[in-house]
Amino acid sequence: MTTAPAWRSGGLRQNRHEGAALLVLEDGRAFRGESFGAIGQTLGEAVFNTGMTGYQETLTDPSYAGQVVVMTAPQIGNTGMNDEDGESDGIQVAGFVVRDPSLRPSSWRSRRSLESALVDAGVVGISGIDTRALTRHLRERGAMRVGISSVTADVEEVLAAVQAAPQMAGADLAPGVSTKHRYVVAALGSPRFRVAALDLGIKTMTPHRMAQRGIEVQVHPARTTAEGLLADFPDGVFISNGPGDPATADYAVQAVRGVLDAGVPLFGICFGNQILGRALGLSTYKLRYGHHGINLPVLDRATGKVEVTAHNHGFAIQAREGSGAGEPCAAGYRPEPFDTPYGPAEISHVCLNDGVAEGLTCLETPAFSVQYHPEAAAGPHDADYLFDRFVKLLSAGKGQRGHA
């Protein structure tokens, strides 16, 4: 158990005792610190994010629904919160954990402090704890349920609530964060293509990246069928990121299979990668502590290029035997294709930290996906080319239909 330092005086709170908070993991380990954000109690899955920046995009990413995010960077909140960088219409995390929150934001774009944004959103957090120790614990033991409370100091009381909370495995969370009604993001400039996007927790920047390339994006609710996605004869279909266990999202798998049956070009990211994998007959599994951050190296096996990429996922596709995923590989190594109901496919990308499969490409069907976030919000722009690859797929498909 760790005790928060007494260095926060004269900042957001004068009386540290009145701002006490408690964090308890499901295995009983506890940390005491200061309340940061709303007063109350929250439960969720504890995961750590290795990004040194981009906390606003992290907080507003719908893929973090149901999770308590531990920031590994020691100081968070320096640039405040603005009105432009949100990835949804509000903060999505179940809770927030930081070591040293900035007392005063310093950015010309800031409109409010991080803590005031958490308070307004009703998000319970904790600060002043040893986030390095907490992160190492999660790396060694794996992601687990956690509770944060600023209304009780009783470890056993919070522990009982944590152990009674539902697990992330088996959680169907995508419909809860998806849009309830179809909407359209207009192309910037002259429209070249029209894409139907299945919103499983889509980030604002993703349709914007497509709009920059002349794509009109029609965003549909999570439970939209293939017939609904294809009703307006789109040039392609996009499957978004999202929270929860992909093994529960049979509705999305069926929609993707319908799109594949129709031969319409398809591109998926993150949760969408897992859904495409399931549609191709692969299974998914829960990672020990997931990939959460903006600095993970991924090998593109087609080019041998290593990309620094943004990730947020706790599940992954189980690669077929012989695909090469999970094994050390040299740059340029090409895996063996494996059979699917839609022709051969291959693992196109792999994480160099742990060998996890990070991408799929169908070789005879116009479909591909990646496990990470090429929209780079927040994160590096190494994978921006994937949107251009989708444009090429849309162009080829439109040419074939026009020729027919």
Image (cartoon, rainbow, N blue to C red):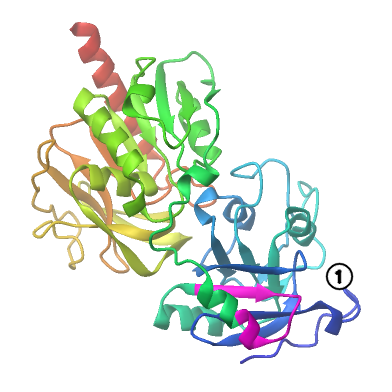
Q: Measuring 62% from the left and 58% from the top, which residue is drawn there? A: 55
Q: Is residue 391 visible?
A: no
Relative to 193, 123 lies left or right = right
Name the element at disc 1.
loop
Q: Residue at x 34, y 21 (%)?
A: 230
Left or right placement of residue 237 versus residue 219 in this view? left
> Which residue position holds label 1?
12
**Is 220 placed above or below 90 here?**
above
Quadrant housing residue 67: bottom right
Which quadrant is the N terminus positioned in?
bottom right
The amino acid marked with disc number 1 is Leu
Which residues are drawn in magenta?
Answer: 145-158
Q: Position of residue 157 (x, y in %)?
A: 64, 83
Quarter assignment of residue 16? bottom right
Q: Is residue 47 visible?
A: yes
Work out whether residue 301 or residue 208 is closer to the camera in this orientation and state it.
Answer: 208
**Can you give x and y, in whole percent of width and height, for residue 45 in the image?**
51, 68
Residue 121 picture location, percent across and down: 73, 53
In the image, is 93 to the left or to the right of 310?
Answer: right
